[in-house]
Image (spheres, coloured by chain):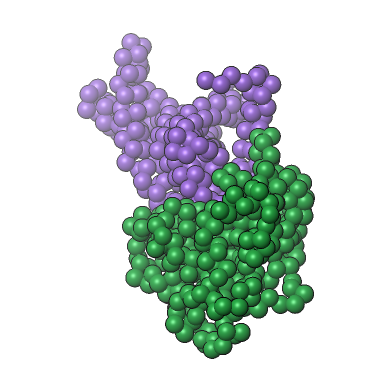
């Protein structure tokens, strides 16, 4: 693991000037059974940035993540991920791209017939040319990141909901992907476990500088992420010192009526005059 | 119950046939693409082949026994009880062995594949596998198809043999036919064409069982109820498909071999 940063400047991942765009949505539309879910949505995710996506249930938040991975194809528009247009790629070519992306599913989606060790090691074992000792070492590292080293030989059904989410995070980060996609990682969890999960996401953002999209309907989670940084020395999440706000590469995207109605930072969100947004964040 | 228009009904059927054909084709094409999952093939061969052995042994033995028992009264009427061995061996090898083994394995494994893959679909495990960069058709479907085709071939041979043993047990124990006579007539009547016909069928049936089971599993929708529906549909479709293909393959091979 990286050496603990000492100053606030080092602790906070800086937004690079002229940042590289990691994910670009251009006029993307998709409908299911003739019911429009997304209509002409466009946004960008810069390198190192985390963007929280909000919207009421059924507003297409999870669909955005599945479109990013190429698990769904849009009816219209283009989606560029790491410079490649996933809407034009064949399924076989997408598998190579997906290896650079980690995803944490809403209900964890762990393989229930495999142990925690096998679940976390899945990607490494699929690559096939990594020595067993290396696999074991990296599984231990990933599980220690989510503080679940003791569950290696357990099956997912033996774990609590919060533990399953943490194993899913370990599985997603084991290859240190360039992008992480979180689908409601705190949904249905108690406040204490939710804070643990948010702390892990902040740790991943600040320690490994991974670009990520976070789908959630818990506004407080995203505000916590926008106002806290991970202190590696203390191994915990801490509030930003006064005046440091805005240095966190954290964006907010709000969906309403199949469209993006807000795309900006926490400060802009708090200042928004839009009636729906005011009601949403109140 | 929701009523659907005839056009939509036909469109659904055509769509199902198209999707099934694509999946079946892809399962074969994957054999020529990397990676190949030999460990998964072995695991499936154990589950499908070794796991099905008890039902295949019992089905084969009692089918042969009841075939001998039922045929004996007719043969006795014509004073041809000595032909019992021939009747049992031809019946088992050409028809009953492959079909009954296929139906038993369809009942056990087609449903198993549909429920396993269906559960993986509804719990997003299939999407998770795709998201992790692994092709589910290579990892899950092709190993099941290869293992079912391979193991059904040998299960059918075992079933044929056990059927003849069952027939022999009835012939010796209940009808008082000399064992040597039973086995020598049973053996002598079998021609290359009979054996060929009996061994081509399990290859086709194995392919049907696995691809139909996987197709219904992978296209399951609607939670646990959807998985239950997929399981039932897989057994019904694969059983009917087996019987249909059996008829046409028998007709085709009879024409090829010049049977009258």
Q: Can you tell which quarter of the image residue B180 is in?
A: top left
| Residue B151 visible in the current orientation | yes
Residue that appears at 24% across and 28% down: B172
Q: Locate residue A64, reporting x and y percent.
A: 64, 52
| Chain letter matching colour purple | B
Residue that appears at 63% across and 28% down: B13
Q: Locate residue B24, reporting x and y percent.
A: 61, 42
Q: Is residue B153 above or below residue A12?
A: above
In the depicted view, which residue is nearer to us: A124 or A241? A241
In the depicted view, which residue is nearer to us: A201 or B115? A201
In the depicted view, which residue is nearer to us: A63 or A96? A63
| Chain letter matching colour green | A
Residue that appears at 68% across and 75% down: A15
| Residue B191 visible in the current orientation | no
Q: Locate residue B211, reporting x and y percent.
A: 55, 41
Residue that appears at 56% across and 39% down: B219
Q: Is residue B74 above or below residue B138?
A: above
């Amino acid at each position: 693991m990286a050496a603990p940063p000492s100053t606030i400047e080092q602790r906070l991942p800086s937004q690079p000037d002229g940042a590289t765009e990691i994910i670009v949505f251009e006029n993307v539309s998709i409908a299911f059974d003739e019911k429009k879910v997304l209509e002409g949505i466009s946004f960008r995710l810069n390198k190192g940035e985390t963007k929280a996506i909000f919207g009421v249930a059924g507003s297409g938040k999870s669909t955005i993540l599945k479109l990013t991975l190429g698990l769904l194809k849009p009816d219209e528009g283009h989606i560029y991920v790491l410079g490649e247009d996933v809407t034009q790629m064949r399924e076989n070519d997408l598998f190579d791209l997906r290896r650079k992306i980690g995803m944490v599913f809403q209900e964890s989606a762990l393989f229930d017939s495999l142990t925690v060790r096998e679940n976390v090691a899945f990607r490494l074992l699929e690559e096939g040319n990594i020595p067993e000792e290396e696999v074991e070492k990296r599984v231990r590292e990933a599980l220690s990141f989510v503080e679940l080293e003791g569950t290696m030989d357990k099956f997912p059904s033996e774990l609590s909901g919060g533990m399953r989410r943490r194993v899913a995070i370990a599985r997603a980060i084991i290859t240190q992907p360039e992008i992480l996609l979180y689908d409601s990682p705190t949904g249905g969890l108690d406040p204490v476990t939710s804070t643990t999960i948010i702390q892990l996401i902040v740790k991943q953002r600040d320690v490994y500088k991974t670009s990520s999209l976070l789908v959630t309907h818990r506004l407080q989670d995203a505000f916590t992420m926008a106002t806290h940084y991970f202190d590696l020395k203390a191994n915990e999440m801490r509030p930003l010192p006064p005046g440091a706000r805005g240095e966190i590469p954290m964006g907010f995207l709000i969906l309403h009526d199949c469209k993006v109605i807000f795309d900006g930072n926490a400060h802009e969100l708090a200042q928004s005059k839009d009636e729906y947004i005011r009601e949403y964040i109140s | 119950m929701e009523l659907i228009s005839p056009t939509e009904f036909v469109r659904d059927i055509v769509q199902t046939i198209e999707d099934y054909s694509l999946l079946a084709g892809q399962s074969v094409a994957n054999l020529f693409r990397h990676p190949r999952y030999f460990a998964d093939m072995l695991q499936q061969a154990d589950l499908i082949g070794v796991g099905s052995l008890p039902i295949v042994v019992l089905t084969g033995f009692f089918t042969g026994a009841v075939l001998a028992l039922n045929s004996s009264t007719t043969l006795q009427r014509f004073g041809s009880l000595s032909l019992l061995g021939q009747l049992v061996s031809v019946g088992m090898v050409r028809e009953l062995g492959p079909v009954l083994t296929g139906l038993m394995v369809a009942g056990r494994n087609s449903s198993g594949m549909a429920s396993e893959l269906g559960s993986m679909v509804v719990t997003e495990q299939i999407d998770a596998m795709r998201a992790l960069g692994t092709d589910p058709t290579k990892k899950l479907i092709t190993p099941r198809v290869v293992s079912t085709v391979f193991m059904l071939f040998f299960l059918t041979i075992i079933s044929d043999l056990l059927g003849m043993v069952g027939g022999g047990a009835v012939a010796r124990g209940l009808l008082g036919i000399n064992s040597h006579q039973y086995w020598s007539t049973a053996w002598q009547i079998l021609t290359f064409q009979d054996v060929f016909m009996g061994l081509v069928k399990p290859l086709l049936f194995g392919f049907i069982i696995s691809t139909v089971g996987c197709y219904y599993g992978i296209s399951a929708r609607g939670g646990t109820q959807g998985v239950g529906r997929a399981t039932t549909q897989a057994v019904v479709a694969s059983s009917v498909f087996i019987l249909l293909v059996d008829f046409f393959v028998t007709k085709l091979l009879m024409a090829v071999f010049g049977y009258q």
